[in-house]
Amino acid sequence: MSNNANTIYYTLTDEAPSLATCSLLPIVRVFTGSAGIDVKISDISLAGRVLSAFNDRLKPEQQVVDGLAFLGELTQDPDANIVKLPNISASEPQLQECITELQGQGYDIPDFPENPQTEEELDISARYAKTLGSAVNPVLREGNSDRRAPAAVKAFARKFPHSMGEWSKASRTHADYMRGGDFFSSEQSVTMDSATDVRIEFVAPDGTVTLKKELALEAGEVLDAMFMSGDQLEEFFEASMEDAKQTGVMWSLHVKATMMKVSHPIVFGHAVKVFYKDLFAKHGELLKKLGVNVNNGLGSVYDKIADLPRSQREEIEEDIQACYAARPELAMVDSVKGISNLHVPSDVIVDASMPAMIRSSGQMWGPDGKLKDTKAVMPESTYAKIYQEVINFCKTNGAFDPTTIGTVPNVGLMAKKAEEYGSHDKTFELNTAGTMRVVDSDGSVLMQHSVNAGDIWRACQTKDVAIRDWVKLAVSRSRNSATPAVFWLDPERAHDRELSKKVTAYLQEHDTEGLDIRLLGYVEAIRLSMERMVRGLDTISVTGNVLRDYLTDLFPIIELGTSAKMLSIVPMLNGGGMYETGAGGSAPKHVQQILEENHLRWDSLGEFLALAVSLEDMGMKQGNASIQLLASTLDKATGKLLENNKSPSRKTGELDNRGSHFFLGMYWAQELAAQTEDAALAAKFAPFAEKLANNETQVLGELAEIQGVPAKIEGYYHAERDMVKEVMRASPTLNALLAEMAS
Amino acid sequence: MSNNANTIYYTLTDEAPSLATCSLLPIVRVFTGSAGIDVKISDISLAGRVLSAFNDRLKPEQQVVDGLAFLGELTQDPDANIVKLPNISASEPQLQECITELQGQGYDIPDFPENPQTEEELDISARYAKTLGSAVNPVLREGNSDRRAPAAVKAFARKFPHSMGEWSKASRTHADYMRGGDFFSSEQSVTMDSATDVRIEFVAPDGTVTLKKELALEAGEVLDAMFMSGDQLEEFFEASMEDAKQTGVMWSLHVKATMMKVSHPIVFGHAVKVFYKDLFAKHGELLKKLGVNVNNGLGSVYDKIADLPRSQREEIEEDIQACYAARPELAMVDSVKGISNLHVPSDVIVDASMPAMIRSSGQMWGPDGKLKDTKAVMPESTYAKIYQEVINFCKTNGAFDPTTIGTVPNVGLMAKKAEEYGSHDKTFELNTAGTMRVVDSDGSVLMQHSVNAGDIWRACQTKDVAIRDWVKLAVSRSRNSATPAVFWLDPERAHDRELSKKVTAYLQEHDTEGLDIRLLGYVEAIRLSMERMVRGLDTISVTGNVLRDYLTDLFPIIELGTSAKMLSIVPMLNGGGMYETGAGGSAPKHVQQILEENHLRWDSLGEFLALAVSLEDMGMKQGNASIQLLASTLDKATGKLLENNKSPSRKTGELDNRGSHFFLGMYWAQELAAQTEDAALAAKFAPFAEKLANNETQVLGELAEIQGVPAKIEGYYHAERDMVKEVMRASPTLNALLAEMAS
């Protein structure tokens, strides 16, 4: 597939990013073309996925390539270079809207079978199922993770810092977590000598063995087993609530029920049961009969009692209120609406909520709408400890100062569903006491735990090939950025001890001469990173999958005020690279604005950054200085754009996405003209830069005058491409200049 | 002086320890004699020092040896082995009492000249001056410091733990310190290539140079210069008081005005000025006229206004009260009497007050007699940071548990008045702005600072020979105790960077194979020590002089509940050793009790421990297994004594110092009888052990029946030795058994 070596695959997705692409790519191609790079579109939009699933029913001219399948295969190509924009993770209602739209456009695709019965319906249902939810990431994320703050973004934050709430040395805020009975305390871990099949079994007290799961493990694969005690979890919750009540701090729960979709809703449910224990003591039977599921939060209680007779409902509502009098104040998600932390399990997500609290002086919103000190409860101690270290650090040293602090990029172990994030199908809530064990194919017990009813047991896998690649990535990031790298490996965790052995061994495979690479426990690692950060020094965090997720919110939010501006690179196991843009979703509200007022506020910053690193990697791989120059000048252009505040405005009539692209193009051309490393490129782009500058007023005028009236693009999920083109390439002057350069 | 190789010099001091010595030594000599060791008395008591100063006026039979001068010389002997008991650091009134007593006993010594005029009076005054105050330590402390919790004491604390206040995770307590403008921020440091003379000079803005001090420096000596800004100190105090007021925590000041006798009273004075700023704004002139010195605390105000007319005095007293309304609550020394933290500079001594606060849940006593969270203010940041680290640690992990924690012994750089503790004659409070500088003999400026009026400037010296010995001591302690050693050297301190170079170089002079020796910054070092401590692991702290002092209170108070039970060893630079006992002073109250009721509550634990290590060192030096066996069996005996609670009771009629000695002797004999390493010693002490055990009731009876009536010893400072002997060796049975063994 060497024809991919000079190709960037740029994903066509949905909504705002897909519109922006129509404006941006013609500009980009002027530059990439100069180095012989082809930028190809690959359609992974929801509509594209739906259509390709039913190509067999479409007319030849209607048929489309299955872009996702194509890219999935491409991930195995060492030359793969994919720029991945945010796409819709379709819910069922969204899918149905999309189907209706496509049918209206004359595509013969079937209705969505709500309740499939026939063989045909089942086939249709199966095809549609593949387009639902997070269909894209598992296919494309064929590698570990390299996330960092781009230099231009960091420089911008230093110059125009976001707000950071001051910290009081007398703050009462703290993290609270279990001191035993959690996954951390019970973790066991084994590394497979050779490929083997194992069984996860439950052994009842009478000896009956129930098979819970079979796993095929690879040689060198690390398998962990651990459990959390339901009883100790509830005792911990009770004690922490009592303590918060007595010391006068708010109580807040921070879990990740969305990602840890099996274990964390259960943990959350225990918190609801304990906090509202008087309610459940009094009305437990009724609520059970009504089908209340505590794992869905107090919201579930309100839902289920909605249809009760008024007096009965009101009694329950009063008893809910009575609970608040006996309990500490709860941190609120929406204090106006009375939505607390325990209302819905997905409202408070630890990796975002903790950094937000840290930015807000360690405080959260109380029921009275005031910011207050908080007991931030994260039952599982493994990762919670790092937040206490951050809190202690802020109390000691005050808030972080975005204008001076260094950066903490991350190299994350993510490939092949590593660690806890791949544990969902191996997580079990136990109904009875007994023994959970992992048994090898030869019958020997690899790990086992005595468990009680209510305990949550889980196993996690980590593949050797992923670890090996992760070590390699860490070394190359440390080398390429001349930055110390710290492997966050806790010597008190069984899993991390296994990983440490591998890391130590695999580091020998690389030239680490002159590099500062260390293995430290989590608390030591975060402390070192913070101590260096406040001194303006950078430190790469090389972490497992969960910490990858947590830290790439924590540090970006501290450093940049948001994690959306991070570079997110997935260097594929086979050598290719994927460059993800933005964490802001595909922005449906942006589409409403352009449809109504022809103003697109989408900020393509993520695309600029991803493109630059995509070019940089390609240039390095090929040893091609021109391509590397394109990358570095694009980065400078992006920096200039930020510095001159040429990002899109939210306000119709002002600079929007299209105008912002004009500036990017102009700055990029100017940077190329100004550089002296490649005279040919300079000569080529100098006149272009001059023409763009000379026509700035003209182009911006053309892009401004079209705004304020509705834009017609005939479709939401599958707009008419020519109409989109007309809307998104609205400056004839710019189009002419681009055409001239491309010819 | 090789005749000293088998001699232990045991100091005869004052008050309780000197009485106890009379009972203990005859027992000890039975054991030491068996290994050919001579235990000699060396009189360094106040009376002894006075008499020896006037030997020329005494009759031949009255003349005494100058024990202190003798021991001073002995410190230079590689074979020196000194057991040093607490002695009186005489105040003038104490000296006068002593003189009167001696004159009454027929010694022709002169009266103390209150206002010496004649040549003779001046001579007398000069002789007496040498007996006043801390006359002993500077003569004897000819080495660095090795302090540790004896194994028996640590075991006792594990079994019978002292109370430790619980810590709330929501505690508001914290350490507060300057973030600039303090000694830490301005420290400069140079190492001398060769011996040289330097001048400390003040250069006025008009160029006038004032010589402040001349110093003769040795080759390799480290000289530091630093200053604290008076203005920034006051701004810091004001801000910290405002913050405490707003956040509702108490304000407390922790300095060491006793030891840092020049700089810290000034720092303390600024705090008084700022806290009572309204008082000084209104009455400043009057108070100045009255001679109030803020460096002596609010007490000075009360003293000086005592003689004012009543109405004027009451107005000032009311204005003092008004200050309390405008300021945060002050931590109290005595809330009943209304004595606050700012009353007298010597009441709150940081090295004792901070550990006490840490033991009391991070709280101090408020004006209302309640324990409360506190802002512990230690203006100088250098060492204050370690307390914040401890506080954070306790909030995160809860109170330390004496039953499980490890120990943190100390190897301290103390020899030759090292570092800040020798800075008093080189500390200057400046009256005008200008430049303070250190100038070499060739006129080159080694260090300089721009200073303002009110700034405190100081220089500190550290001699190379002391550092070299300190490194050697650290290595040998790490080797001998098989314990990791951490040099607390902060890379952000100029002085410590100089020391780090030396330490790194001098470590090469030793065999460190297999040892874990690290250099870490203070905060890292204390964190590591605590993390290890809570896991039951020991870590030697190898520190400078101030941290030596601070840590040998902090850790002992956490581990043992007191620092009085620590072993305190001074391995002399020339190879000898001094073994100091107890930190409890010479206990005048104990003497009152024996004079009135013939009960001595003095606990000779410190002497047992010091003797054991004195023997251990002697045994190691000589490669003499029998002496080492004496040491280890004495340690075991001491452990047994603690475990069986055979320490003296405070209550007359119960076991006292003498009975406790009996048990020590019996246990020691039993341990020797029970061991199998040295058959001869076992054979010798087995019958003795048996006899002591058989006579236990008899001996204890004899020692009990004498109690309850006054004891006659004819003298306080210079008691009649035979009468002391009669009192302190009151069991004929025991005396006979000892005589039998000695014969």
Image (tube, coloured by chain):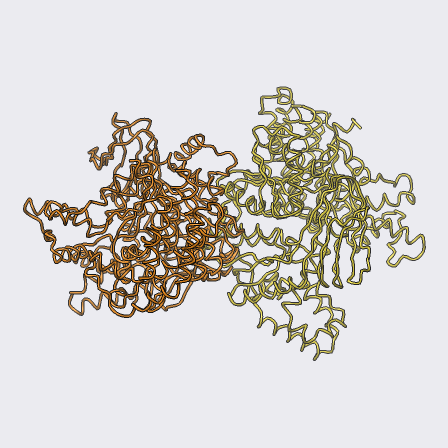
Chain colours: A yellow, B orange
Above or below — where is B577 with respect to B21?
above
Q: Which residue is farthest left?
A: B118
- Residue A613 in sight: yes
Q: Say which quarter of the image contains residue B432.
A: top left
Number of marks in the rendered image: 0
Rendered residue at 77%/72% (across/down): A289
Q: In which image quadrant can residue A205 be found? A: bottom right
Residue A267 in percent (x, y) is at 67, 60
**Which residue occupies the extreme top position in the image?**
A679
In the rendered image of this protein, does residue A656 appear above or below residue A611? below
Name, please, the residue furthest toward the bottom: A311
Q: Position of residue A523 (x, y in %)?
A: 56, 47
Residue A521 in the image: x percent, y percent? 58, 45
Viewer-side residue, A25 vs A559: A559
The answer to which of B244 and B593 lies nearer the viewer is B593
Left or right: where does residue A385 sit relative to residue B386? right
